Structure formats: structure tokens, C-alpha cells
Amino acid sequence: MGTRSWHLAAALLLVALLGIVATLQYRWLGDISRAERERLQSSLQTRASEFEVSLDGDVTRAYAAFDVDPTMFAVNPAAALSEAAARAGRESATGNAIKAIFVAEPGVEARVKQFDTAAGTLEPAEWPSELQAIGQRIAAAPSLAIGGVPLPPGFMGEALDGEVPALIVPVVSPEPPVASAPGEMTVRTLPSRSTWRAVVVWLDAGRLSTGLVAPMVSRYFGDGGESDFNVSVVSRGKGRVVFRGGDAEVDPKKADLDADVFALRLGELHWTRSIPPPGADGKAHDALQDRVAITIVRRGGDAGDGPMPAGLSGGAWRMLVQARQGSLDAIVAQSRLRNLTLSLGVLGILAASLALILVASVREQRMARQQLEFVASVSHELRTPLAVIRSAGENLADGVVSGDQVTEYGALIRNEGRRLSDMVDRVMDFAGITSGTLIRSMRATEVVPLVQATVSGHQMEAQERQVRLIVRSASALPTIRADPDALRSALQNVVGNAIKYSGAGSEVEIDVAATNRMLRMSVSDRGLGIDDDDLPHVFKPFYRGRRAVDAQIRGSGVGLSVVQKIVHAHGGEARIARRTGGGTVVTIDLPLSGMERA
């Protein structure tokens, strides 16, 4: 009882500890998942920021290339545009996607010219249908609120058009020079409005996508099937798809990241003009060698007319990024599930190992207890016949008995010696099971002589217990390949048990028959019988049924275990069942494969 209580307490303690560990592991995995979510979001934001800086920087360099010198533009606009286009192509991928260049004057919708790149000239033209909306906006903005500074045209202030796409670069008329002596500061007030013209750089959407967007997506988000993300770039107005990378187009409502791209980066725009080149004599201007004259130009009127140009405050495109698994939350959930499964698997293996250790411990203790009981039982059974043999031998030696009593004493010594031999044989058989030497030699064996010899060996015992042995067999039985000594030992155990548990005047029936597939030997008795609860355990070593224990019938509990091991070694099957009307039936089936008919 104490051992069971100890095992139960240990099992409960281990279960509680495993439950605590599992709970802590679940919480730890939750913390790890949240940290992983933040890490992935930060990494994605960093990639998007780097992508935005690179793409917008490229677009800004193209835009800045067309921020031509107004004086040069006023003298020779075609030459200024040719130089600007060449510089844009050298410094940016956007410059290599130029489809056409137009120059328009605000307030006069019909006055638009197209730059002929082959001839290097400006020719009168009409707005293409794709650019008509831009032409209308330019026509509606006759002047700039802040002259001298290249801001987008008109009240709408759109420097970039994401739908066309196009760059809209204003060219403001040059201001008249201010005459000032070296070292003097002059303050001059100019009109609040200035005339200007717009350079519209029409970009090829396909070339812009393949030459600018696609390489940058590959650089920052991975290439094709190696990427963990689906990336879509769409125009902000109508949602026109500029670029799609990955398995599917990203739904804006399900995007893990939504960023503005295709915008000007003010930090990369240079508004200052270059210093004039040296004079005809090759010398620098005296003013630059001596002192600098500073002129501050103040615009008259309200210079704050209108809102901040929209093209400078946001991107004309939207970059939508979504994890290919569905979302960052899905990636984290999948990772958490994988980690949780692994952790629970480890805990499960640990729990199973602990359970196996407890089961093995209980089994070892039970086996040790049964072995002690077996030793005690064998010792008791050996002591009884030895005591009888010793007493009879002493009486014969001392001459206490004579005449007919000598014959009786001889029979007594013979019977007790037989009991002693049977007990020793069973112990040796069990030892053969544990050492793996139960089967020694397989050879052709006649079944009928083996059964008859076994029954004859138990004839004297059956007569003493007033039990009649009945053998029924076919006239011709197969010659089987078996170990005759082992098979005889198995049959002796079964017949001996049937006799031992049968009452006086009962019968033990031994039936032997063969079919095309098996040889069957069955031993039936009408003795004590076995309870249904004991039937599944009777072939276990040292196990004895409750009826046998209650009836105080001596036994070791190893006989049927030996029988089952021998039969299994021959490829057969041993079964035990209750007999209708009381008693027990033990059946031994041996396969006939590899056997020959007699």
C-alpha cells in the first residue's frame, strides 16, 4: 500500500510540474511571438524606407536634371532640354524611361510644343489624350505665387503625376540683375507674381516599372520565388497597377505595409545656380576674388497664397506589401504553432518517458515480489517431497519397516521423487525461457508417440487422484518439424495442470487432430476452472488464478508461461478458455507449413 501511495504521489507531482512547465512555455512563446512580430514589422518598415529613399531619390535626380537655368532656357530652350535629358539619363533610371518632352505656357492651352530628340528642336504640337488633364491644369495656372523658386505649376501644386506618369517642372523667367557694389547689401522688392513655363516629361510606365521599380523590389524584398512578400505599386488616384511582384496583387485592406513612393525628396533638390564661368580672358570675376555683394529679394504682396503644393508632401504612388503567407500575423502564428508543437512534443516525450519509468518501476517491483513468492513456493514444494523421502529413507535404514511396508515405502519414495523431478523440470524450463535456450533441436517428430509418452508419464499421478485420462486422435497424423523435448514439456505442463485441478472421479480429455493448415492439440478438464478476470493473465510468469490460490493448490505459476513460450517458438498459438459446465480447455495450434504428411 505504501509503495502504491509513493508511486501515485510521484506521478501527481510530475504531472503538476509538467503542467507548470507547459504553462510557462506557452507564456514564453507568447512573449517571443510578440517580439518576433515587432521585429518583422520593424524589418519590413526598414526595407520599405530604404526602397522609398532609393526610388524617390532616382525620381528626384531626374526631376532636378530638368530644373534648367532660366537664362539658358530663354536663349535656347531646345539646347537646354537636350542637355537636361542627357543628364537625366546619366544620373537616374527614371531618365532612361522618358517617352516624350513637352513645353507649355500657362494661360494659353493651345501653345504647347514637343521636343524632338532626334532633331533637337521644339515643334508645335497638340496634347496627347494621356496628357490633356495636365495641360488643363497648366492652362488654369497663369502665374506662380513665389517667383524665382521652381515649384510645381498652379494652385494644385502637382510636381509628379502618378497616373500618366509624368514629371512637371516649372521654368521661371529670370529676374533682372541687381547692380550693387562689392561689400554693399541691397534690398529690392519684386512683383508677387512671375511668368513661367512648364516642362512636362512624359515617362513610359512599362520601362519605368521594369527599369526602376522591379530591380529595387528585388533588392529590398527579394527576387521572385525567394521573396517572402507580395509587393504591389499602384497609383494613388485611380489605383492603376504600376508593378506587381509575388504570387498575387496585394489588397490594400490586407496589406502589412502601405507607404508613399514616387515623390520628390526636397533634401536632394539643389535650387542654387552654378557660378558663372570665367571671362573671355580666362580669369575669374574680380568680385569673387575680393568681396561678395549680397542681394536680398523680397516679394511684394501675400506670398502665402494657396496651400502647400501637394506634390511635395506625399507620394503619387502607393507601395503595398503583404507577407506571402497572408500577413505578418500569419507568419508569427505559424512560427508560434511550430514552436508550441515542438515544445509540447518534447514535454510529451518527457512525460511519456516518466510514465514508462514509473510503469517499469511498478512492474519490476511486482516481478520482484512474484519472484520471491515463486522462490517461496518452490522451496515449500521441494521441502515437502524431500521431507517425505528423507523420513521414509531413515525408517528403511533404521529397520523400522519390514515386509509389505517396504513396498509401500518404495512407492512413496518413487512418487515423491517424481514430484520433485517435475518441479525441477519446470524450474529448468523457466530458466530456459529467460536464457533463450528453450528450443535446442528442430527435427521430424511423430505426434502420436509424443502424446502417448506424455500421457503415460502422468498415468500414475492420474490414478492416485482418481482421474481418468482419455486420448482421442486420428489414425494418421503429420510428421512435424519440432523440438520433441520442448513440445513434450509443454504438453506435460498442460496435462499435469488438468490432473492437478480436477476432482476425484473426473476425466481429462486429450484430443489431437490435423487439418490442411494446422495441427491442434486440446486438453479439457472438468475441474476447478478459471474466473473470466484471470483468463487474460494466466500466461504471465508467476501468475496464479484466484480459485487456485483460494483452494490452496500448490503451484509456481510458471507452467502456462513455459507452454506459451514453447508454442510461440514453434510458430503456433496457445489459448485457454472456460469449458461449458465447468472446467478448462487449453488449445495448442501448430502450423503445418513446412511439414510433411506421414
Image (tube, helix red, strand yellow):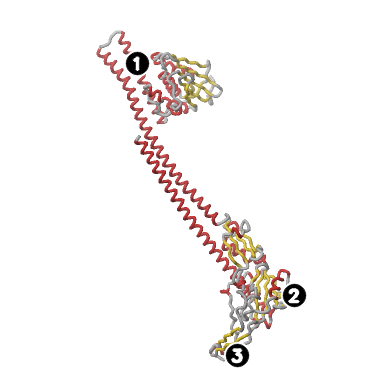
Mark closer to the observer (3, 1): 3
Q: Does residue 48 appear to the left or right of 378 in the view shown?
A: right
User: Is 146 in front, or is 48?
Assistant: 146
How packed mark 2 is, by other alpha carbons closer than 10 Å (few <14, some 14-19, many 20 or more), is some
Is 225 located above or below residue 553 in the figure? below
Q: Are marks 3 and 2 in contact (CB under 8 Å)?
A: no
Q: Position of residue 242 (x, y in %)?
A: 65, 64
- Residue beneath disc 1: 414
Q: Which residue is mark 3?
A: 179
Q: Is residue 439 visible?
A: no
Outermost residue, bottom side: 181
**Quarter of the image where one finds residue 265:** bottom right
Secondary structure of residue under mark 3 = loop
Dot placed on the residue nearer the N-terminal end, 3 or 1 = 3
Task: Residue 125: give its label.
Answer: 2
Q: Nearer the viewer, mark 1 or mark 2?
A: 2
- What's the amino acid at mark 1? Arg
Q: Is residue 133 left or right of residue 259?
A: right
Q: Position of residue 459 (x, y in %)?
A: 41, 15
Q: Amino acid at mark 2?
A: Ala
> Which amino acid type is marked by label 3?
Ala
Q: CA distance from mark 1 to mark 2?
A: 136 Å
How far apart are the alpha carbons under marks 3 and 2?
40 Å
Q: Is residue 239 visible?
A: yes
